[in-house]
Image (tube, helix red, strand yellow):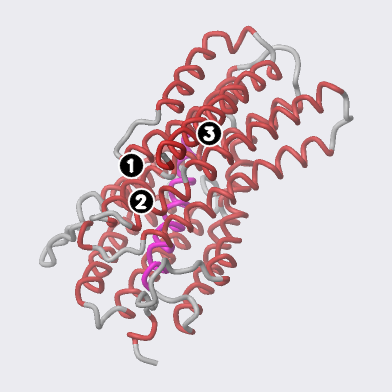
Amino acid sequence: MSRRHMLRDRASGGHARVTYVELFFDLVFVFAVTQLSHGLMAHPTLLGVVETGLLLMAVWWAWIFTAWVTNWLDPERAPVRIMLFVAMVVGMVMTMSIPKAFGDRGLVFALAFVAIQLGRSLFTAWAMRDHPFQSRNFIRISVWFATSGVLWIAGGLAEGGARLALWGGALALEYVSPALGFWTPGLGRARAEEWDVEGGHLAERCALFTIIALGESILVMGATTATLAWTPLVMAAFLAAFAGSLAMWWIYFSFTAEAASEAISHAKDPGRVAREAYTYIHLLPIAGVIVTAVGDEWTIHHPLGHTDLKTALAVIGGPFLFLLGGVLFKRAVFRSWPRAQVVGLAALAALAPLSLAVGPLVLSIATTAVLLGVSVREGLVRRSNARRLDV
């Protein structure tokens, strides 16, 4: 089979469909999100938040770069499919190492992460050899991943604060690389607007990862409620948590996902939009959903009484991150500020001074009310705009 046959066929028009192989690949990251949320529940300290945040950034980076690769390469082709299956196996090792990544499995996590990033990029550079620009770009990417890989492995061999610092440096290198066009000595840099990205496919892939995160929140609230006596307070906390997840789904999928997919498909520079909106910004709503799930678990367990600082930060911080991501995402894609979500951010910030004076259930209901308010307002705006277009 020639390398040309590994590429997706874009001649038929429309955006490339997400394949079953890609959905199967995503199952590894369902497990990863579960590991991250449980890790944050087990270590709700400042250090635990920093470590979980770093691991989330690594998990997201492994997933989003694979989504970029399958934007060009066809997962239905045997070599590409085998590459994804190998990445799944290594990804499972990485994910299973998450709970002890800052303990005795740090080197295992680092080696697995570097293997995914570097191996996938080298494979793509080979597979796209007949397309000099893209192949050269993935050679650049491989150089960056090899450089950061030294820090990842050194961090895996180190302990404590040294590991955190080395891994933080490795992530900083990787996260800054797209913004710098993966500049490499002798190869120069790539401009995002030159990337032949199929925006609709990438938008759909990121929407599916959002479903993964929301699915984890449903699992957390369901599993927690199932183990407790179903008192009116517990059920009220469950319903508030479920309504919050429903509101987040409504905000993202009813008012954002489809419109963003359409916008990026017709953008003059889809590479730039994809880099800003999906590679970078999209991590914020994902983090928001995960943090919200942690807050829901704590609230369902203890709906009344004193709201401690960790619960208040999770219950308010999760929706805040979600809406902040939505605001920045819409700004990157549509070049406008969504007023409903900006007002929602202000409302959540206003709850902060009151958070420690009310019980967890009251605080959860208040944040859910903000999310529901944003979803209702955006629905009204969307209807108004649709009527205006029909006139």
Location of residue 155 with respect to 318 vertically, above or below = below
Between 39 and 362, the one lying in front of the other is 362
Q: Residue 204 in magenta?
A: no
Magenta span dominant secondary structure: helix
CB contact under 8 Å: marks 3 and 2: no
Where does residue 292 sit, x and y in percent of width and height?
A: 59, 33
Q: Toward the viewer: 55 or 97? A: 55
Q: Disc 3 or 2, which lies upstream in sequence?
A: 2
Q: Residues within 10 Å of mark 3 (few under 14, many from 20)?
A: some
The span picked out in magenta is: 47-72
Residue 390 position, x and y percent, is 43, 42
What label sits on residue 263 in the rendered view? 2
Q: Is the N terminus in the top left, top right, bottom left or bottom right quadrant?
A: bottom left
Quarter of the image where one finds residue 231: top right
Provide the residue designation for mark 3. Answer: 379
Q: Report, in whole angstroms, how far the alpha carbon at label 1 lies from the one at label 2.
A: 7 Å
Q: Name which residue type carries label 2.
A: Ala
- Residue type pointed to by label 1: Phe
| CB contact under 8 Å: marks 1 and 3 | no
Find residue 53 and name its label. none
330 horizontally vs 207: left or right: left
User: Helix, strand or loop at disc 2?
Assistant: helix
The percent coordinates of residue 82 (x first, y second) are 50, 79
Q: Is residue 52 magenta?
A: yes
- Measuring 61% from the left and 22% from the top, which residue is drawn there? 369
Residue 66 horizontal side relative to residue 353, left or right: left
